[in-house]
Image (cartoon, rainbow, N blue to C red):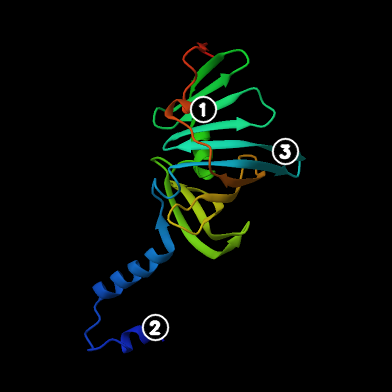
Amino acid sequence: MHPYSVLLKSASPPRPFSFCHFFILNIFILALFIIPSAQSSFAATWQADFTIRVSSPRTQTILFSGTFYQEGLKVRIEAAGSEEVNLFDFKSGIRIRVFPKDRIYFTNPLSAAKIIKAAKEAWITAPLPYLESKILLWTGEIKGKAARLYLMTLTQSSLKSHALRWVTDDLHETPLRIIYSGPANETVIVDYEPISGKKFSADYFEPPTNYLSLNPF
């Protein structure tokens, strides 16, 4: 029996079912499950405490944490126990390493690897030539929040990489947990605990004007 035979029998009044109808129906059903990502697929402005675990059979598990801030395509990372603050501007394609204790900073171009890592960790949607898509696998609850689980796929020509991404079950789809494989086949688990209440201005994503810029580094 054809998979759409029940659908066809229930159609009233009956009409000839052309190849064109069949093609459109397939595309519609496919679109329900395979959803191209958009820049607005997660909150444009949000902040969270994060924990990252990197596990490999060859080394001990690496664990680090901190606080994450994002506004549009700008990100600020404050790692716990570090004297360095990292600022990312994905529109300008730069990373700024700020050292508050020494009142200095360094500006570097973002590498392709860092941009892809940012896409996997849900900071941005992967830019061209990468194509990012997602398949809804599950809806339920995680960390006491209603959530969705997506299989994320990054494609460039014949090369593909995948990640599991849990997000809040709302229009913002704020990331909650992400699991993906690193370049050396290590397992990377990123946990976000979204927080609210702390306000920040646009200059929060820029080095202080009275700090000294030291380049190159």
User: Which residue matches tag 2?
Assistant: 2
Q: Quadrant of residue 51?
A: top right
- Quote the CA–CA distance across marks 3 and 1: 22 Å
Q: Nearer the viewer, mark 3 or mark 2?
A: 3
- Quote the CA–CA distance across marks 1 and 2: 55 Å
Q: Estimate the x, y position of residue 20 in percent, counting from the top left.
A: 24, 72
The residue depicted at 41 percent of the width and 58 percent of the height is 35
Element under label 1? strand
The residue depicted at 67 percent of the width and 26 percent of the height is 82
Determine whether, in the image, residue 53 is placed left or right of residue 38.
Answer: right
User: Would you call the spot at circle 3 few (<14 residues within 10 Å), some (14-19), or many (20 or more)?
Assistant: few
Q: Nearer the viewer, mark 3 or mark 1?
A: 1
The first of marks 3 and 2 along the sequence is 2
User: Which residue matches tag 1?
Assistant: 87
- Quote the CA–CA distance across marks 3 and 2: 51 Å
Compared to residue 29, the image places residue 123 above or below, namely above
The residue depicted at 62 percent of the width and 41 percent of the height is 50
Q: Quadrant of residue 217?
A: top right
Instruction: Give the camera-side residue of 158 and 150.
Output: 150
Element under label 3? strand
Q: Estimate the x, y position of residue 96 in percent, counting from the top left.
A: 51, 23
The first of marks 3 and 1 along the sequence is 3
Q: Are marks 3 and 2 in contact (CB under 8 Å)?
A: no
User: Which residue matches tag 3?
Assistant: 62
